[in-house]
Amino acid sequence: MIEDLGRGGFKLIQPENCFKLDTAGVLLAWFASSFSRKGRPCMMLELGSGAGGCAMLAAARLPDAKIDCVEVMKEPYCALIKNIALNFVSDRVRSYNCDVRDLPALLKEKLYDVVFMNPPFYRTDRAVVTDKENEQAARFNELGTLEDFISCASSRTRMSSGYTVMCMAPSRLPECMELFVKYKLAPSRLISVHASYGKDAFLFMLAGKKGSPNTEFKML
């Protein structure tokens, strides 16, 4: 099934038993794109791209951006390849079937202006919520812990001018803050997301600047 993403004519193929593009992915694409510098192409890396919904939205927002997408699971990765072709962005969006804990040499040679990610929200000691293998892996940290993702993101973020951008469940904000500091990412922007007025946040988005300890922090 091909769905319309509602931006720039971009479309998306989403396999039935894979994690689907959701509110978190849509907002993450917007937030990550906001750190692009005007007047020059933005080099971006997405860790855990799935079928590529977030990356396609970022590509639609930033026509000059170059985006590398990393996805370890085979079925979502195959859908990612199809979505790159479907939207005619193979000249600026590339896919890599690999683990964030073991990036290929080509990616290890690059530094990026923006590294963005929607890591698995839950630890493996939480109850199983789905019998779909690909969706299960996307929700739980069986293929990489939160620290694995943040460590990898920091290693590929350009020093002094690059940003790591992520979204996560609110209960893990203290852990994310600690890991950002550990891996030399100065927290710079935090947004809490609420379903409606009076409701507790169900999501937060966090951005950190690489190697800039005096970065001004703002809660938006």
Image (cartoon, grey):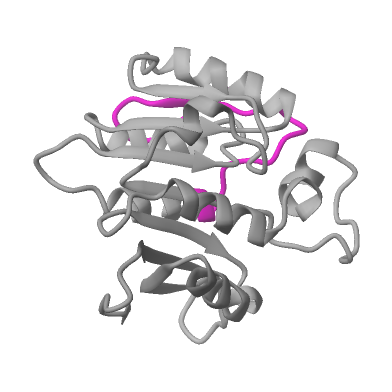
Residue sitting farthest toward the left: 39
Query: Is residue 9 part of the magenta span, yes or no?
Result: yes
Q: Main secondary structure of the magenta part?
A: loop
Is 88 rendered above or below residue 120? above
Query: Is residue 146 part of the magenta span, yes or no?
Result: no
Residue 152 drawn at (x, y percent): 56, 50
Residue in the foreground of this view, choosing between 191 and 36: 36
Q: Quadrant of the C terminus?
A: bottom left
Q: Residue at x 36, y 52 (%)?
A: 32
Residue in the foreground of this view, choosing between 206 and 103: 103
Q: Residue at x 51, y 65 (%)?
A: 183
Is 5 rendered above or below residue 47? above
Residue 169 drawn at (x, y percent): 62, 69
Q: How many marks?
A: 0
- Image quadrant of residue 73? top right
Residue 11 drawn at (x, y percent): 45, 25
Whether residue 5 is visible to the viewer of this picture, yes or no, is: no
Which portion, as a residue range, is magenta?
A: 2-25
Q: Quadrant of the N terminus?
A: top right
Q: Is residue 61 left or right of residue 132?
A: left
Residue 4 drawn at (x, y percent): 45, 29
Q: Residue at x 36, y 18 (%)?
A: 89
Q: Is residue 181 left or right of residue 160?
A: right
Q: Residue at x 90, y 57 (%)?
A: 128
Whether residue 100 is visible to the viewer of this picture, yes or no, is: yes
